[in-house]
Amino acid sequence: MKFIHLSDLHLGKRVNEFSMLEDQRYILTEILHVIDAEKPDGVLIAGDVYDKSVPSAEAVALLDGFLVRLAKRDLQIFLISGNHDSPERMAFGGRLMEGSGVHLAPVYDGKVRPITLTDEYGRVNFYLLPFVKPAHVRRCFPEREITTYTDALAAAIEAMGVDPAERNVLVTHQFVTGAARCDSEELSVGGTDNVDASVFDPFDYVALGHIHEPQRVGRETVRYCGTPLKYSVSEAGHQKSVTVVELEAKGAVSVRTVPLVPLRDLVELRGTYEELTFRGFYEGTSYQRDYVHITLTDEEDVPDAMRKLQILYPNLMKLDYDNTRTRTEVCLDGAEDAENRSPLELLEEFYQAQNGRPMGEEQQAFARTWMERIWEEDEE
């Protein structure tokens, strides 16, 4: 049985105020071309389908069109909500869509019933577990002590009653310990969203969503497929792709990737203003079409540089300087990258500045516990 693993479409996303809708429409068509070439039995979409819990009308229409085109290919489609999605909105119409082969994960209620397909080797059970927090799972299992994300996932998976003799696939959306993150992913309180990969032992393949760079976590068959597009400068070096998984007899799983070529790439350029405006530098390249992050190395700021560079690089997203001034410039502790740091990291920095010493382990644990409780109460 062959299936395609996708995740983190983030439909409707804007990057540095640039709408990604045209790029997303293009890459979804490219994904359909891969599907037509690979002829899989199913497609797994592991969460963060939308970029916001209340998506725009354009984003909803884009997903609708994609699902319709997938369903026309006589595929089984498995889709879950991620931390950016509203589980209630993503689950809407799920029972009606099943007749078209589109399986939407319902809002988590403690029960995850498998969807079973068969091939020449027998049954393959697909379990759809949307993004959950400890508070969500604790409500379903009040008798269990559930304080961490690993506790929550362990309880949810144990309740599935997975038969280890059969082939089992899990589609879920979590941060698994050891995965490499980038700037465009949502940070949680002090890394408390870590899930130990050992909870996934009952599954032959785990289709993960949440992390934007394609990668394995632990074993080869616990994988993030990554985003189909680059959604931050920190992803400029990523090779985006589609993950293709083939299951044969129990224990025989092969995984490979098919590269995706976007409508416009996201690239980083570095040099002096004179170097980057020299015709020989950009002529004959895709830089005038790509999304661009430029770092100027001139010692003196170039007047009106952003506007001037946009004439040559219309999709210039961001302009920075790297020179003596910026390397020695003093700024407020943590202010330059506060949005990319967790609340616990910011509290630790504040404590260090106020007290002249770092927080102790007991203080860190106390702060982490109360941050997590407050966060969970907000969800309830």
Image (tube, rainbow, N blue to C red):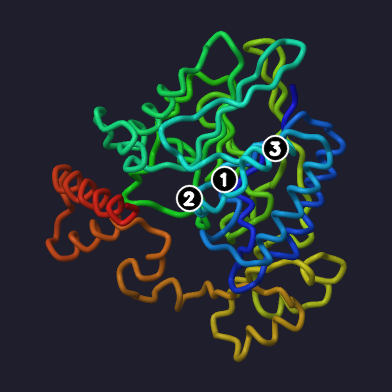
Q: Amino acid at mark 1?
A: Gly
Disc on the earlier residue, 3 or 2: 3
Picture layout, residue 191 above or below residue 1: below
Looking at the picture, tell me which residue is in the foreground, 105 or 274.
105
Q: Residues within 10 Å of mark 1 (few under 14, many from 20)?
A: many
Circle 1 SS class: loop
Name the residue tied to disc 2.
83
Q: Quadrant of residue 199?
A: top left
Question: Is 37 left, or right, of 86 in this rendering?
Answer: right
Circle 2 SS class: loop
Picture layout, residue 196 above or below residue 269: above
Disc on the earlier residue, 3 or 1: 1
Q: Are marks 1 and 2 in contact (CB under 8 Å)?
A: yes
Q: Residues within 10 Å of mark 3 (few under 14, many from 20)?
A: many
What residue is drawn where x is 61% and y is 56%?
Answer: 10
Name the residue tied to disc 1.
47
Name the residue tied to disc 3.
77
Q: Amino acid at mark 2?
A: Asn
Q: Quadrant of residue 128?
A: top right
Q: Residues within 10 Å of mark 2 (few under 14, many from 20)?
A: many
